Amino acid sequence: MNPEAQTLMSDEIKVAKNGKPWRTEDEARRALAEMELDPKVWGVVPRDGGWALEPHAQTLARQAAGREQTARDARARAAAGEKYFWVVFAARQSASDAENVELSHNGDRITVRRETEVPLPQRFLNVADAAVQRVFEPIRRGSIPYRDAGVIRRRPYRIVREARQKDFVEYMESGNNVTRQAILASAGRASDDAGV
C-alpha cells in the first residue's frame, strides 16, 4: 500500500496521510483502488480545494441538507418582504364548490372558512388568483363547436384591509376550527373511511 494513500478518518471522509485532500482527482481514484474500497459505496468528492473519499450515502445526505437549507433561506427571504391582508372568501357559488377554501403553497397548506375575515400572506392570495377555470360558449355554425368565453376565478376573495405578519401568526396559532370540529366529531379516533 502506498504510504501517501494511508488515511485519517474524519466523519467517514478519507484523506491523504498528511491530513489534507489529494491534489488531483486521479490521485484520489488511485487511492480508492489501492485501499480496495468498494466503488459502489465510496466515491471521490471535491473537498477543501482537493479531492477526498466519502461514502455515497453521506454525499447524498450532505447534498439533501444543503438543498433543504437553501429552500429554508429562500422562504425566509420571501417572507421577510411579504405583505399580509385581511380577506373574505366568497360563499359557495355552486354545489360542486367545497365548503371551505383550501390553499397550498410549496407544501404549506391552509384551510379557510368561507365568508369569514382571515389574515393571509400574499403567497396564498397568489395561489387563489391562479385558480381559474376556462369557460366556453357554443357556436351555432362553424367547424368549431365552442369558443372561449373567458375565465372564472375559482376562489374569489375580497381584500378588506392590510394585515400584519403578527395577525397571521396569531390566527394560525389559535388553531383551525374546521380541524377542531373534525377531531371532536370523531372523539379523537381515526375516521371510519381511513380503514381503521
Image (cartoon, rainbow, N blue to C red):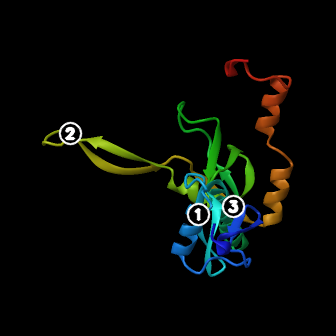
According to the picture, the residue beneath numbered tag 1 turns out to be: 34
Q: Pointer 1: residues within 10 angstroms few (<14), some, or many (20+)?
A: few
Q: Which mark is residue 145?
A: 2
Q: CA distance from mark 1 to mark 3?
A: 31 Å
- Kind of residue sitting beneath label 3: Ala
- The extreme front residue here reads 1
Q: Nearer the viewer, residue 38 or 175?
A: 38
On the image, the x and y values in percent for residue 25 come to: 53, 74
Residue 49 placement, left or right of 150: right
Q: Pointer 2: residues within 10 angstroms few (<14), some, or many (20+)?
A: few
Residue 168 placement, left or right of 139: right
Q: CA distance from mark 2 to mark 3?
A: 53 Å
Instruction: Tell me which numbered mark, 1 or 3, is placed earlier along the sequence.
Output: 1
Q: Which mark is residue 60?
A: none
Tell me what residue is drawn at x 64 percent, y 54 percent.
Answer: 57
Per the image, label 1 sits on a secondary structure element best described as helix
Asked if residue 150 is positioned above or below residue 9 in the image, the reply reads above
Asked whether the viewer can see residue 92, the reply is yes
- Kind of residue sitting beneath label 2: Pro
Name which quarter of the figure residue 135 lies in: top left
Tell me what residue is drawn at x 62 percent, y 77 percent.
Answer: 22
Instruction: Tell me which numbered mark, 1 or 2, is placed earlier along the sequence.
Output: 1
Q: Which mark is residue 65?
A: 3
Q: Nearer the viewer, residue 189 or 87?
A: 189
Q: Nearer the viewer, residue 180 or 140?
A: 180
- Kind of residue sitting beneath label 1: Glu
